[in-house]
């Protein structure tokens, strides 16, 4: 009998996307799968929409709002699969994503090896998804993967992974203290418990970019910034446990420098803590810099004003791109509807 794969979906205020996500899960060509949705106290129609899909293969649960990590832990606690596919409620899987990775597993792969795959950004039209290879798109050791992540500011989306139950058990539960970068911290532990990463290029995931509405967007939230600091500390602790070489310390310093922009100047307390971590690694951090476009704002009105302008400009640019993609998506849907009439 083929192994059972558990597709686990935490959902919060995702009524606009959850149907598409569930359809992509149901469309998986891998024959043995169970789908578990945990609604994390949504205030919109997410639970109602998800329940329309309930069947022998799709379980839909709800709980008071406790965060994505708690919803994922709940989903896993009732799952039965020998392999776990994590899937956020706005992302999509190519129909053969799981089958492609399970083909590698069936060839005798050690269950302690973690499987990853290619992912691409999209907004509404998946055919416009951009699959841009990164230094992580290779077969790698856990340490090499983590160092490349820090050195190149690279990452993998949670849905790219396929994880054996043995490896999931070894990594432990999602950290419910984290409301931001909980996936980065969790998969850091999965990687450390693994015996390596097997990259399957044909196993594709579609990551929906939602901008400032995303749960992964800090937006100046003090709670999320505290969560991000904790995740950074845990990442660095894990890497240093594996390796204290010059390269490892340098990678950690690069990682810290990247996040300075998120904390300066609103959280000087966290900036000071990052500097202390840098000193413990034998280095120091520079104050973040903005591009020349905002230099005059910085000189006249100060760093905070320049940073707000930078963020607002990117938000406007993103809103226009999102509006255009949605307009094209809806126009294409109308054309297809007329053609099928």
Image: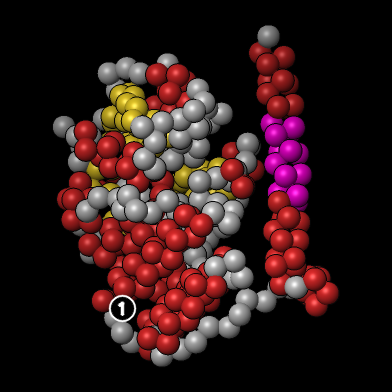
Residue 146 against residue 22 in the figure, above or below: below
Specify start and end residues of the magenta stretch as a single range: 316-329
Crowding at label 1, few (<14), some or many (≥20) Cα neighbours within 10 Å? some
Q: Position of residue 323 (x, y in %)?
A: 74, 38
User: Which residue, given by chain and number where applicable, does mark 1 sit on?
Assistant: 240
Quadrant containing the N terminus is top left
Nearest the camera: 295 or 53? Answer: 295
Q: Residue at x 59, y 66 (%)?
A: 266
Q: Residue at x 38, y 54 (%)?
A: 178
Q: Residue at x 80, y 77 (%)?
A: 299
Residue 329 against residue 101 in the figure, above or below: above
Q: Left or right: where does residue 132 sit relative to residue 316?
A: left
Q: Left or right: where does residue 278 sit relative to residue 15?
A: left
Residue 55 against residue 194 in the figure, above or below: above
* Residue 169 makes an appearance in the image: yes
Q: Residue at x 31, y 84 (%)?
A: 244
Give the image quarter of residue 98.
top left
Quadrant containing the C terminus is top right
């Amino acid at each position: 009998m083929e192994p059972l794969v558990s597709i686990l979906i935490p959902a919060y205020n995702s009524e606009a996307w959850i149907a598409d996500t569930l359809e992509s899960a149901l469309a998986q060509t891998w024959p043995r799968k169970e789908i578990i949705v945990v609604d994390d106290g949504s205030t919109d129609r997410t639970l109602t929409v998800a329940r329309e899909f309930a069947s022998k293969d799709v379980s839909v649960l709800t709980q008071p709002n406790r965060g994505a990590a708690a919803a994922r832990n709940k989903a896993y606690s009732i799952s039965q699969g020998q392999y776990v596919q994590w899937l956020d409620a706005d992302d999509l899987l190519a129909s053969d994503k799981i089958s492609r990775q399970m083909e590698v597993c069936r060839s005798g792969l050690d269950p302690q090896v973690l499987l990853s795959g290619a992912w691409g950004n999209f907004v509404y039209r998946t055919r416009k998804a951009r699959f841009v290879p990164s230094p992580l798109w290779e077969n790698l050791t856990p340490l090499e993967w983590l160092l490349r992540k820090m050195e190149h500011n690279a990452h993998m989306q949670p849905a790219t992974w396929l994880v054996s139950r043995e490896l999931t058990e070894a990594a432990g539960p999602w950290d419910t203290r984290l409301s931001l970068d909980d996936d980065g911290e969790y998969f850091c532990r999965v990687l450390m418990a693994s015996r390596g990463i097997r990259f399957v290029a044909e196993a594709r995931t579609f990551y929906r970019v939602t901008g400032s509405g995303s749960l992964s967007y800090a937006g100046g939230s003090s709670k999320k910034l505290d969560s991000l600091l904790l995740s950074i500390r845990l990442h660095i602790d894990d890497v240093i446990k594996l390796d204290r070489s010059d390269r490892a310390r340098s990678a950690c310093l690069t990682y810290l420098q990247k996040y300075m922009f998120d904390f300066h100047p609103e959280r000087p307390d966290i900036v000071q803590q990052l500097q202390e971590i840098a000193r413990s690694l034998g280095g120091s951090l520079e104050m973040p810099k903005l591009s020349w476009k905002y230099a005059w704002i910085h000189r006249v009105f100060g760093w905070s004003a320049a940073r707000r302008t930078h963020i607002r400009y990117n938000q406007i640019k993103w809103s226009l791109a999102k509006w255009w993609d949605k307009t094209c998506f809806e126009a294409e849907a109308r054309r297809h509807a007329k053609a099928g009439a």
